[in-house]
């Protein structure tokens, strides 16, 4: 069983360790369960469940879980052109293009980045990839991802992500220009009840989302920003820019179809067909080794940016 996001009520009383009970219930490993407890991804009766120790669960208790990312699928190796940024015995860093789903999910069981990675690493179809991906980015977001190649690096990276000790920066084009040059957005994070694919900054949500942003340059009706994640919630930057009143350019889910007024630019945006968000930077320390990676903007992003600078 693979769980992404769901809410359900328990049908009977249970008294045992939370990690043992929930890992069996959700069909994931205890280490993956512990990671998601640390990430505050599991709510019990609306309150964050953070401890893996013994607990009395009662019939009717409501569990709200958002397991992220998916894990331990028997993945079909599918050769893929991968842009390998770095590789050693412990980690693999790739630059994901837009339009590629990171991990298999309902409706996307093949052609994902992980299908390509297991082929690259020589993992057979009958094998279970463990460890592996410890974070992900949206299908139409491009940029850097780190994959653990062994259990030690997996556990260390999982801990760093849970403790928000990974440096993650993005570049984004947003509509308009914020009143301030920089700022921090801290909100709740919950699924939109009206549009289930979207998230919104629910002030009553117990899950927190924190983004630090800064304007790098401004053009006619559009700004280039850098955004640094303190937490890593689903759609976090896209949700927060919408909340700020300056949605990510070309993000139909959060801003609808919007035109710049520049015919050439609007034509390019239609051709690009994805939101203008790119993961540029990853930094972390494992095995007493410091790692720091940056990547240039992809061609579609650079083309849009060049047109803005020349207008």
Image (spheres, grey):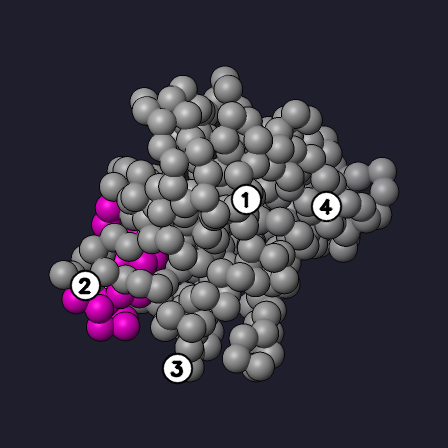
Please give the residue where the numbered disc 2 appears in the rendered image: 127
Check whether the beta carbons of the residues at disc 1 and disc 3 lie within 8 A of each other: no
Q: Is residue 144 visible in the rendered structure shown here?
A: no
Between 22 and 134, the residue placed more toward the observer is 22
Please, what secondary structure does the residue beneath circle 2 have? loop
Q: CA distance from mark 1 to mark 3?
A: 32 Å
Circle 2 or circle 4, nearest the eye: 2
Q: Residues within 10 Å of mark 2 (few under 14, many from 20)?
A: few
Please give the residue where the numbered disc 3 appears in the rendered image: 89
Between 2 and 277, the residue placed more toward the observer is 2
Please give the residue where the numbered disc 4 appears in the rendered image: 223
Residue 261 lies in quadrant:
top right
Identify which residue is drawn at 62% across, 29% down. 205
Dividing the image into 4 quarters, which one contains the N terminus? top left
Q: Earlier in the sequence, mark 1 or mark 4?
A: 1
Question: Is 72 left, or right, of 254 in this rendering?
Answer: left
Q: CA distance from mark 1 to mark 2?
A: 31 Å
Please give the residue where the numbered disc 1 appears in the rendered image: 50
Q: CA distance from mark 3 to mark 2?
A: 19 Å
Residue 71 at x, y percent in the picture: 33, 53
Query: Does the stretch in magenta take in 212?
Result: no
The outermost residue toward the right is: 180
């Amino acid at each position: 069983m693979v769980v992404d996001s769901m809410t359900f009520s328990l049908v009977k009383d249970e008294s045992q360790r939370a990690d043992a009970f929930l890992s069996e219930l959700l069909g994931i490993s205890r280490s993956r369960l512990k990671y998601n407890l640390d990430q505050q991804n599991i709510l019990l009766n609306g309150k964050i469940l953070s401890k893996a120790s013994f607990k009395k669960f009662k019939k009717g208790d409501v569990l709200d879980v958002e397991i992220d990312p998916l894990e331990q699928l028997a993945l079909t190796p599918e050769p893929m052109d991968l842009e390998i940024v770095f590789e050693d015995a412990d980690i693999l860093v790739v630059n994901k293009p837009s339009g590629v789903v990171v991990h298999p999910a309902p409706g996307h069981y093949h052609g994902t980045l992980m299908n390509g990675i297991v082929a690259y690493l020589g993992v057979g179809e009958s094998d279970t990839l463990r460890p592996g991906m410890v974070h992900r980015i949206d299908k139409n977001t491009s940029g850097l991802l780190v994959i653990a190649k062994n259990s030690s690096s997996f556990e260390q990276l999982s801990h760093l992500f849970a403790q928000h000790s990974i440096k993650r920066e993005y570049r984004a084009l947003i509509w308009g220009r914020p009143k301030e040059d920089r700022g921090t957005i801290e909100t709740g994070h919950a699924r939109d009840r009206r549009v289930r694919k979207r998230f919104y900054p629910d002030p009553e949500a117990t899950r927190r989302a924190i983004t630090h942003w800064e304007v790098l340059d401004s053009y006619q009706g559009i700004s280039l920003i850098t955004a640094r994640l303190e937490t890593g919630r689903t759609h976090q930057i896209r949700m927060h820019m919408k909340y700020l009143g300056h949605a990510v350019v070309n993000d139909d889910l959060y801003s609808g179809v919007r035109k710049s007024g520049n015919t050439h630019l609007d034509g390019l945006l239609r051709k690009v067909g994805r939101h203008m968000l790119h993961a540029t930077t990853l930094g972390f320390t494992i095995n007493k080794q410091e790692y720091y990676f940056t990547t240039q903007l992809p061609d579609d992003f650079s083309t849009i940016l060049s047109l803005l600078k020349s207008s």
